[in-house]
Image (cartoon, rainbow, N blue to C red):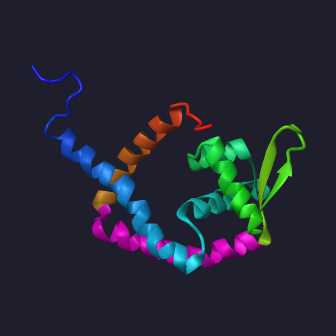
Amino acid sequence: MGEPYALDLDEAPFWRSLMRITTALPRALEDQFLPETGLAITDYGVLVALSEAPDQVLRISALAATTGLSLSRISRVVNDLTRRGLVEKRKCAEDGRASNAVLTDAGLTRLEAAYPSHLARVRASVFDHLSTDDVRTAGPVLARLAAALDATPPTDDC
């Protein structure tokens, strides 16, 4: 009798491929993106989340949840983006203990400049290797996996 948690012959290659993608894809995207734009993929994700938020403002904890980063990681990223003038950090009016991240005009300009390069790299790294049917089939599967992760309370690395 096999291990109770052993992966079967379909699960094992799926899992190995998924692990390869989750480690190699961000690195592949960032290798050229960072030198071209001065933004790490994490920076870009934070700027996108802020650009899509009402008034381009999010509470730091909401920004962490939106980006999938821990509170300590999002604080470091926001502090770095603030130092670079791309984001402002402001006290939350509703709760003086909390802070909001606010996208600056410079941050929006940088995001808009990086957008075409990022999309070109995403297309070349992912979508150029998939058919329309692949995308339609895989999209809901990946959405379910993402939703399951969102339902799992994150742990902070503090």
Task: Return the x and y of residue 17 as percentages of the image width and height.
Answer: 26, 52
Task: Return the x and y of residue 47 as percentages of the image width and height.
Answer: 66, 62
Q: What is the quadrant of the C terminus in the image? A: top right
Q: For residue 124: magenta?
A: yes
User: From what the image shows, is residue 148 above or below residue 50?
Assistant: above
Residue for point 60% across, 74% down: 38
User: From what the image shows, is residue 119 above or below residue 42?
Assistant: below
Q: What is the quadrant of the N terminus in the image? A: top left
Most extreme residue toward the top, as rendered?
1
Most extreme residue toward the front, as rendered?
158
User: From what the image shows, is residue 32 above or below residue 20?
Assistant: below
Residue for point 38% across, 55% down: 23
Q: Give whichever of 129, 114 is nearer the camera.
A: 114
Residue for point 56% across, 34% down: 155
Magenta-drawn stretch, dominant element (helix, strand or loop): helix
Q: For residue 136: magenta?
A: no
Asked whether the viewer can see residue 10, the reply is yes
Taking the image as shown, residue 36 lies to the left or right of residue 109, namely left
Asked whether the viewer can see residue 137, the reply is no
